[in-house]
Amino acid sequence: MTPPPSSSPSSSTSSASPSPADLVITGCTALVHDEHEGIAFVEDAAIVVREGVIASIGPAEETAPVATAERIDARGQVAMPGLINCHTHAPMVALRGIAEDLPAEEWFNDVIWPVECNLTALDVELGARLACAEMIRGGVTCFADHYFSMDTVAAVVEETGMRAHLGEAFFSSQGPEGREKSLEFALRHRGAADGRITTALAPHAPYTVEYADLAATAELAGAHGLPVHLHASESRDQTDNSLTRHGVTPIEVLERTGLLGVDAGVLIAHGTGIIARDLPILERATGPVAVATAPRGYLKFAWPTTPVRALRRVGVPVGLATDGAASNNSLDVWEAMALTALVQKSTEGDPRWLTSRQALHHATLQSARAVGLGEWIGSLAPGRRADIVLVDLSGPHTQPVHDLAATLVHSARSADVRTTIVDGRVLMRDRELLTVDVPATVRELTDRLAPLTDRSHGGRIQDYDKPPQ
């Protein structure tokens, strides 16, 4: 994977480095990670940013004399690493609320896949732009997207200033051209947008991509140093169907086709159907493996949740996600963080799992690792890219603060994010979006809704894996 561009800032406090800064944030409480993979909070901190990189974090008084192009007074606010949406389909915000209260097979076959036959590049562009606006306002600085017309999404990422991990989705029903298009996209856009775009090969899922195509994808990933992002074991029904038809689980399919040995890693979306026999397979994987969990959608589909605790025991990082807004209705990773903590407590029958601090770790550093960027983002430290959000906890729903981690996870909301910064560039300041014209986007998208949502043609782009009769 091509890393974001980097410089070599001093790891000392800014008083030892007299060169002007691009941005200085003062007076905040900074969320930092310790060497034991825990989190801590530094009071009255200042963050110095040069050339898109965090140069130092230190006492606020030591940065007072630092010359800077931009200074943000963040007194009373918490500085956090930007949140990461580890699996979504950003353009699907155009389909928000179109298919409600349906089981997965009807949701796909009767509504979503017929509607997606109508998608144009303009629909994808407008949906992606609106999605980026929603995520920026919610403190998301990076997202992993798996969809169609990804050249268009890449252009929107560059325009809006976000960071993204992008893959052009394909099915075996497209023939070899689908896989080739996914590879061409990944190679063409790797390192684009000044390094803010990383790419992956993106087969849809084991039930829509044949074993030979999955094996070929693994070979291409190895040959080109690319990671793979796909859906697998999305639900227990999918796992049961695979066992009935083929005698193996979707995770076993990934192993047999070589995807669990990809050097650049594989990101598995959902994994709610991962069962006990899959865990040793994931543990012995010879390449990096991560899972993205999107709990709100599972609640809507009446699915079980991702076995986060079991995955962590075998060394698999779990990142937070929203999935697309067509199933989740929102791209609110803040909500995903709170739901992950709550659903895990309920599922495990243990109020001590997940703790607020563990949930914050999943939302930041583990999510960065899940998308292959753990060395560059996900924590506030010298040398990391300056992807930072400032959270205002002055509202009545966040006061008083007895436990800051609990306040952030269980009381704060995405609307409490005041400022969002990616690569040292301010994309939202004091709730004002600086890179997206939302009213214009909504007007243009609204004009497209009638042709986009027409299902009278009777077609669909794919078939969902219905249970055997």
Image (cartoon, rainbow, N blue to C red):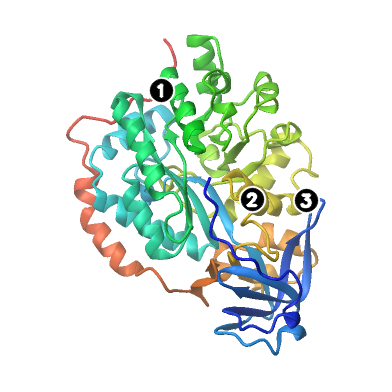
- The residue tagged 3 is 37
The residue lying toward the viewer, choosing from 265 and 279, is: 265
- The numbered mark, 1 or 3, whose residue comes first in the sequence reads 3
Please, what secondary structure does the residue beneath circle 1 have?
A: helix
Q: Is residue 326 left or right of residue 371?
A: left
Distance in Å between CA atoms under marks 1 and 3: 38 Å
Q: Does the residue at mark 1 contact the one at mark 3 (Cβ under 8 Å)?
A: no
Q: Residue at x 64, y 56 (%)?
A: 378
Please, what secondary structure does the residue beneath circle 2 have?
A: loop
- The residue tagged 1 is 213
The percent coordinates of residue 117 (x first, y second) are 25, 37
The percent coordinates of residue 185 (x first, y second) are 36, 43
Q: Disc 2 marks which amino acid?
A: Gly
Please, what secondary structure does the residue beneath circle 3 have?
A: loop
Q: Is residue 347 above or below residue 208?
A: below
Q: Please state which of the two labelled residues, at mark 2 or mark 3, is closer to the viewer.
A: 2
**Image quarter (top left, top right, bottom left or bottom right) of the C terminus:** top left
- The residue tagged 2 is 374
